[in-house]
Amino acid sequence: MLPENYYKERLEILHKQLSKLTRKKSRLGWLRFTVVIALIFFIYIFWSAGLIYVIPVSLLLLTGFIKMVFIDINNNNLIAHTKVLIEINEDEIKSLEGNYHHFPAGNEFIPKEHLYANDLNIFGRASLSQ
């Protein structure tokens, strides 16, 4: 398998995964909103019946809400990781096409005291490090 084909297939997989994760993020947001509305509704309805009904339902809904927050945090981390993987694969495709100018030049590593550092083309634009 050619490297270009591998990276293109990998990009397709990662874009599908990112699409799934963003849909999951949207669903989790709506679900959390629904839980908050349900909590307010149950407190309003059962308040007159007494705290014996309000507290268990409230605790149950709050536990569900907190669990969804943690699931959403993990989902956001997966989204960020997938975006980084997409960027890496796109960089690899660009480098296979011979386009290296989007990589960092490494100018911060040029030794100031070395007289011939600029002549060696190790750091800077269109250099070995780029």
Image (spheres, grey):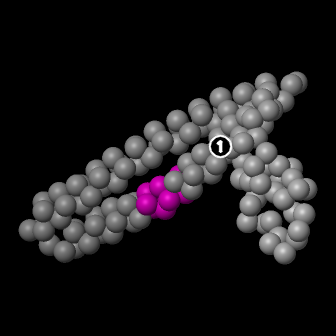
- Residue 57 lies in the magenta stretch: no
Residue 74 appears in the rendering? yes
Magenta span: chief secondary structure: helix
Magenta extent: 67-75
Q: Which residue is mark 1?
A: 87
Q: What residue is shown at x 40% (from left), y 60% (from top)?
A: 64
> As rendered, which of 55 and 102 lies closer to the eye?
102
- At label 1, the amino acid type is Glu
Q: What residue is shown at x 17% (from left), y 57% (from top)?
A: 41
Residue extending furthest toward the front: 115
Give the mark count: 1
Residue extending furthest toward the left: 48
Q: Quadrant of the N terminus?
A: top right
> As rendered, which of 86 and 127 lies closer to the eye?
127
Q: What residue is shown at x 43% (from left), y 57% (from top)?
A: 68
SS of the residue at dot 1? helix
Query: In the rendering, at what x and y percent does residue 59 appear?
Result: 33, 69
Q: Is residue 58 above or below residue 28?
A: below
Query: In the rendering, at what x and y percent does residue 8 appear?
Result: 72, 28
Residue 88 appears in the rendering? no
Query: In the rendering, at what x and y percent does residue 116 appear?
Result: 90, 63
- Residue 70 lies in the magenta stretch: yes
Within the image, what quadrant is residue 15 found in?
top right
Is 35 left, or right, of 20 in this rendering?
Answer: left
Query: In the rendering, at what x and y percent does residue 111 appear?
Result: 83, 70
Q: Is residue 101 above or below residue 120?
A: above
